[in-house]
Image (spheres, rainbow, N blue to C red):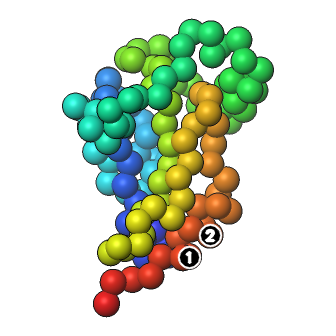
Amino acid sequence: MCDLGVPLVAVVKENIGTEIQDFRPYFAGDIYVDVKHHFYGPLQRKMGGLGFIRQGVWQNFMRAWKAGYQGNMLGEGFVLGGVFVIGAGNQGILLEHREKEFGNKVENEDVLEAVNRIVPVQ
């Protein structure tokens, strides 16, 4: 639960080595492994090897590296992620951010704006 009273949940596609343990200091919510990749949908969005020649990918890599993130070269590694803010009850999806390339981050302000639009179920 974050300070705004909204539960935080992460869905990851795999847990290799200590990946989830290493992620926990950066994420205060529950973390689930979607072994069958149901959450990722029938058409997983992937960026192939040519993604590594994109300037934005290298800029994102350098930003992460300078911040101390090391990552690893294990696992699948090509499925793009995203961030969703899902409202209570029938509100549905209030924010949908799908990575366009590796390391494409959602804007914190966009997440906070969407979270503040959540109307609690009475």
Q: What's the distance in space between the residues labelled 2 and 1, CA to CA?
A: 5 Å
The residue carrying pointer 2 sits among few (fewer than 14), some (14 to 19) or many (20 or more) residues within 10 Å by Cα, namely few
Circle 2: residue type: Glu
Above or below residue 88? Residue 104 is above
Q: Position of residue 74 (x, y in %)?
A: 41, 15
Indicate left or right for 15 with 82 as reference. Answer: left
**Mark 2 and mark 1 residues within 8 Å of each other at the beta carbon:** yes
User: Could you tell me which residue is drawn at 43 percent across and 76 percent down?
Assistant: 5
Report how many numbered discs are placed on residues in the image.
Answer: 2
Indicate left or right for 79 with 101 as reference. Answer: left
Which quadrant of the figure contains the N terminus? bottom left
The residue carrying pointer 1 sits among few (fewer than 14), some (14 to 19) or many (20 or more) residues within 10 Å by Cα, namely few
Circle 1: residue type: Asn
User: Could you tell me which residue is drawn at 54 percent across and 76 percent down?
Assistant: 117
Q: Position of residue 33 (x, y in %)?
A: 27, 38
Indicate left or right for 106 with 27 as reference. Answer: right
Above or below residue 67? Residue 25 is below
Which quadrant of the figure contains the C terminus? bottom left
User: Could you tell me which residue is drawn at 27 percent across and 38 percent down?
Assistant: 38
Which structural element holds mark 2?
helix
Residue named by callout 2: 113
Residue named by callout 1: 116
Q: Is residue 10 visible?
A: yes
Q: Position of residue 83 (x, y in %)?
A: 50, 49
